[in-house]
Image (cartoon, grey):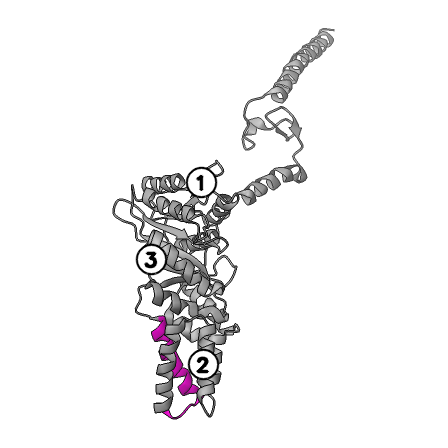
Amino acid sequence: MNESLAIILTIVVGLAVIGGFIPVLLKARRNSQNYTGPRDANDPASLDGDGSFASSTGTLLEDRPETLAPASETAVEEVQAAPTLEKPLPVEGRLVRLRARLSKSNNALGKGLLALLARETIDEDVWEEVEETLLLADIGTDSTMELVDVLRERVKVLGVRSPEHVQAMLREELIKLVDPTMDRSLNIERHEDRPAVLMVVGVNGVGKTTTVGKLARVLVAEDKDVLLGAADTFRAAAAEQLATWGARVGVPTVRSDVDGADPASVAFEAVKAGIEQEVDVVMIDTAGRLQNKVGLMDELGKVKRVIEKQATVDEVLLVLDATTGQNGLTQAKVFAEVVNITGIVLTKLDGTAKGGIVVAIQKTLGVPVKLIGLGEGADDLAPFDAENFVDALLS
């Protein structure tokens, strides 16, 4: 009897103990689900009894691979959405590529002269064709006469006109005309207390903004710290276009949020920011102007004067479309009078008969062609080299 009573008491006590723990467990379960604070998935405390993760809102996520996929995909999308900086091509590689492109193009200058001077008999008719070829190439009247006189004399003395001799002779004389002695380096070295400042000018439609963007890539490839100034405030998309070019290589752009803002003010702020941020080069993109519009040209002069209140303008590059020929020479003269051009950028120099504009501009202004563009690619801009240019024409 006593034994039976002891067994019954043991069972009662056991049931009481178990009954007491059940509410505690349920309460703990509810607390886990209702917790709204931060949770670390790697922390055992954030694991529920069934092995699933509790979110910060208390919603349970089953611990299966497919339920974790959305989080992983989101992370990947965020990384992909971040701007990926492009790595511009080295300058050396550009020169080789541009030379190859020019040599394969249908240039009338080098090929035409080679064909004419390699004839068995060179009479007055041939020399007239030589003159015409040079004039069509926009070399200019004075340079054409000078080159023809030299070629006449050399052919007369040489006597033999094998292709090798003709090419060597033409190469020497054309290189002299293009003038390898001119300083074609860009003035882009940072000063002790301020950056180098570079302005890009030109008429409408020659590709100034694109040239600034491509030149930024050239400078970044040379490990320069660059800042852009969007002082073309008349063309609605110009600032956005410039900022896009800069963002591709990690270069910031100073711009105005107001359409038609004072370009001189934007240029001033860009240079000021460049000084404060201690960059190497500040490049200012300006609005396209017609060379016969006095007011616009005066405003361009104002931009330069305002910049020089805090820093000298070290380089003024005039962008010209090589296909415009002698009209480009007229443009160059007017711009040179307003802002003191220090260098020329020739775009679309893709082997057309207009390649002689290089000679004409340099001879007229005494200003070197410093950069050339032969295509629409982001890295289709390279420093101009006289010997490489002539070799490409004659290859």
- In terms of sequence position, does the residue under pointer 3 or pointer 2 come before the other? 2
Work out whether residue 38 or residue 136 is closer to the camera in this orientation and state it. 136
Q: Is residue 361 above or below residue 391?
A: above
| Start-end of magenta stretch | 158-178
Q: CA distance from mark 3 to mark 1?
A: 25 Å
Work out whether residue 226 or residue 311 is closer to the camera in this orientation and state it. 311
Q: Position of residue 38 (x, y in %)?
A: 54, 25
Q: CA distance from mark 2 to mark 1?
A: 50 Å
Using a 10 Å C-alpha cutoff, classify the residue at mark 2 as few (fewer than 14 neighbours), some (14 to 19) or many (20 or more). Answer: many
Amino acid type, residue under disc 2 in the picture = Val
> Which residue corresponds to the image point at 43% horizontal and 57% vertical from the top-left?
319
55 magenta-colored: no
- Mark 2: which secondary structure? helix
Location of mark 1 (residue)? 255
- Mark 3: which secondary structure? loop
Location of mark 2 (residue)? 130
Answer with left or right where residue 62 lies relative to residue 108. right
What label sits on residue 342 in the rendered view? 3
